[in-house]
Amino acid sequence: MVTSTCFNSAGNTTSLVAYSILLIVIGLLFLCYDPDSTRITKYFTVSPTEKSTRYKPISRMNTQRQGQQQFCDEECQWLQLQSHRRETLHEACTAYNESSPNNLRQWLMDHLNVLLFLWVSDKHKALYCNVPKVASTNWKKVFYILNKGVVPYNQSFISNVISNLHVHTNTTYADWQLMRMSPKDVIHRLKTYTKFIIVRDPFTRTLSAYREKFENEHNQNRRIWKTWIYKMYLYVTRQNSLFELPYGSQFTWPEFLQFVSNPNAKFTVNGAQHWMPISELCFPCQIKYDIIGKLETLDNDAKFILKKLGVPELESVVSSSSGHATNSSDADTQHTYLDELSVDDVNGFERKYEKDFKLFGYSMFSYVQN
């Protein structure tokens, strides 16, 4: 009897303790309840349009537009894609041991060429690296409007700029280039403005440069380009040519690719910017671009870039066909020119443009199938 009583007493005590603990837990949960937490919206995983390992999460969404629905809209997907592109760039820069300089002023003094390609709009606090053969003419027109137009931009003014074939030439030394500003003003804009860059697959960009400069019969400067590039060829190869090139003759496509892929070639601008690696024009590891657009997704990228700048009405300028289209991004065209190249040509090109491939998530494997 004594033993039974002891066990009953112990059991009652255990039940009482467990009940007390339960009451304490319920009380704590009630005290920690936050009505605002019900406004946190989850998002669906977005299937990436580029090779991706992970996206940075977005914990809060703007639920005012779509109530409490759980979704990731087009802009949300674009922001996730931008996050992935910046992550790819950062990882590649780290692998190359490149980062923002501690002394930005001194770095700029040592890399003045970059200022040739940085365009600015003080009105919209925007800064853009203008890369040749990446819809650069149309983006120059955008910045012409931003700097010469009056807000709100008149549609007739926009149409006139789109049809103006000379804007490309007239803006070459425009006063809204960073190269025409003081070091103090340059640094201020680099640190505070929205910075963006539009990139392109290195192979199609180089192919586009060749086709426009040396094959395009409508290029009035084609003869000048032939003479100029032959002189550059002699300078780059220091007379030790890998192939013979009679004065003024036409470069074949394989010869041109060998030329630009020369491991000893140290191109300066003055024309070579049309095929120079973007990493040598815009220095994306040293200048932290907020937005990375791609020619392959230009329509979507331009829409949200211009929305960010507060000028969505300029979307027609970027999407207009007034640029120098060579159809070099067409798959059939790419394979036609690729078939003319040897394995050594392709490997040499990939080595020369390795950094661009890695910084921006491109790969020659998209062309060369095993």
Image (tube, grey):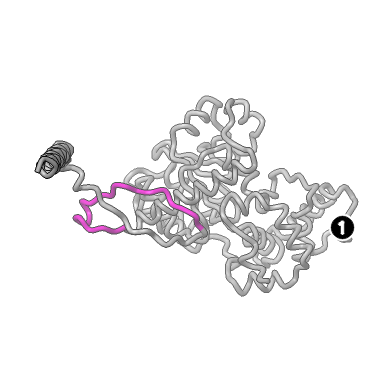
Q: Amino acid at mark 1?
A: Leu
Relative to 203, residue 35 above or below = above
The residue drawn where x is 52% and y is 51% is 198
Residue 230 drawn in magenta: no
Q: On the image, which quarter does residue 181 sit in?
A: top right
The residue drawn where x is 28% and y is 53% is 42
- For the residue pair 312 and 259, the one nearer the viewer reads as 259
Q: Which residue is mark 1?
A: 242
Give percent across and percent down for residue 178: 54, 35
- For the residue pair 286 and 214, the one nearer the viewer reads as 286
For label 1, the SS is: loop
| Residue 157 shows in this picture | no
Image quadrant containing the C terminus: bottom right
In screen coordinates, is 340 left or right of 355? Answer: right
**Magenta stretch, residue numbers:** 52-72
For the stretch drawn in magenta, the main secondary structure is loop
Q: On the image, which quarter does residue 43 sit in?
A: bottom left
Give percent across and percent down for residue 239: 90, 50
Q: On the image, which quarter does residue 325 sit in?
A: bottom right
Image quadrant containing the N terminus: top left
Residue 53 drawn in magenta: yes
- For the residue pair 36 and 285, the one nearer the viewer reads as 36
